[in-house]
Amino acid sequence: MKNFKIFLLPLFFLFFSVLTISQNDETVIYMFYGQGCPHCTRLESFLDDMQEKYTPLVIKEHEIYFDSDSRELFQKMTKAFGQETQGVPVVFIDDKMIVGFNNAIGDSIESEIQRCIEEGCIDPIEKIGGETTSIIGESSPLKSSEQIKITKSITIPAVFSAAAVDAINPCAFAVLVILLTTISAAGVKRRALTAGLAFTASIYISYFLMGIGLYSAIQASGFTHNFYTIVAILAILIGLFNLKDYLWYGKWFIMEVPMSWRPRLKSLLKGVTSTPGAFLIGFAVSLFLLPCTSGPYIVILGLLAKTTTQNYALMLLLLYNFVFILPMLIITFAIYFGFTTTEKMEEWRTKKLETLHLIAGIILILLGIGMFIAMRLGWV
């Protein structure tokens, strides 16, 4: 089982995370940003991470491009701090005003947070003569620890649900069965095991990397709220398309690998005869799988970009992709240990095709509706 350990070790290693630091005293930060500003998005993600790391941290966010009240507050605070600037992002902490964001500025902000927690700091709003309750209430809401708990309770079931939809996708089964059939024909049983594991590992890595890229692009765009609404609609539409495949399979289009792509895909898989070849072909095959597996993935990426911090999103992406490849691992081991054959697996897949689309459709529709309910209740 040496090869098995080699291929699975990177997967399990990725699931480790650092422990958050917990403190008691409250430290208030005011952040002013503009919608669509890339540096603002990076700062917002950084401060979200800081809030998870330092629980006494309170972050009050204000968007100044489209919110006149927030813009007025911004002008008052910059004047009170003796500086003039029209650019964002800007952070106010204790008696300091910090403009812009990069790695060095992030280190400085964290140092100030640590100092304030240890020594105690004033609320920056006191520099302009006290609280401005109406302005604070009308701008971006406080991201409290309670809100973070609610958000996590929303995203974890959603991640499991969408990953399960991807995991039972019939075209992912078909690709693995074709590969194992080809390699098993060589008569070396152990090679089929290592090739299946290598193929599964490459699918995991490629999908995880694509997820990071898409998540970063969504966050950098600065339109996470609008994108969240779009993906909620997308989840319902993809769910309805899957129900169409259950009721009228093959009519108009199918939520699987396009028919025109299949001959090329089969020829690629049938050319694989070794474990390294199976690992390399997994990256190419992941592109063929995108049309029938990317829907739930994009839905989850939109949800994570809107509701979670970058570090927490990374952990959930690791979890999502592990659930996604879990059936591939099960099929590989089942065939290796003789519990089934590739012929029986293909026969089962063909018989259950419509049922798998029905399950996927119901889960995605419920996920989309749940996202709209969460927006309506103000949870995201």
Image: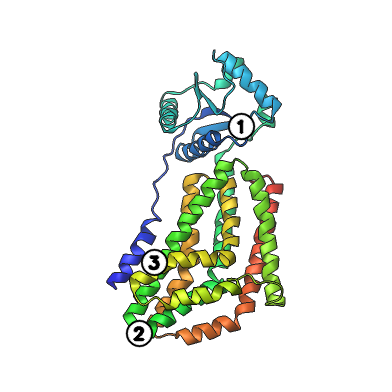
State the SS at label 2: loop
State the SS at label 3: helix
State the SS at label 1: loop
Identify the residue at horizontal 49%, vertical 45% (top origin): 310
Tag 1 residue: 34
Using a 10 Å C-alpha cutoff, classify the residue at mark 2 as few (fewer than 14 neighbours), some (14 to 19) or many (20 or more).
few
- The three-letter code of the residue at mark 3 reads Leu
Circle nearer the viewer, 3 or 1? 3
Label 2, label 3: how far apart the Cα atoms are: 19 Å
Asked whether the residues under the numbered discs 1 and 2 touch, taking CB atoms below 8 Å apart as contact, a structural biologist would say no
- The three-letter code of the residue at mark 2 reads Ala
Using a 10 Å C-alpha cutoff, classify the residue at mark 3 as few (fewer than 14 neighbours), some (14 to 19) or many (20 or more).
some
The answer to which quarter of the image holds residue 133 is top right
Tag 2 residue: 186
Residue 11 appears left or right of 178: left
Tag 3 residue: 280
Query: Is residue 362 in view from this perspective?
Result: yes
Depicted 33 relative to depicted 186: above or below: above
Say which of 374 and 211 sits in front.
211
The answer to which quarter of the image holds residue 219 is top right
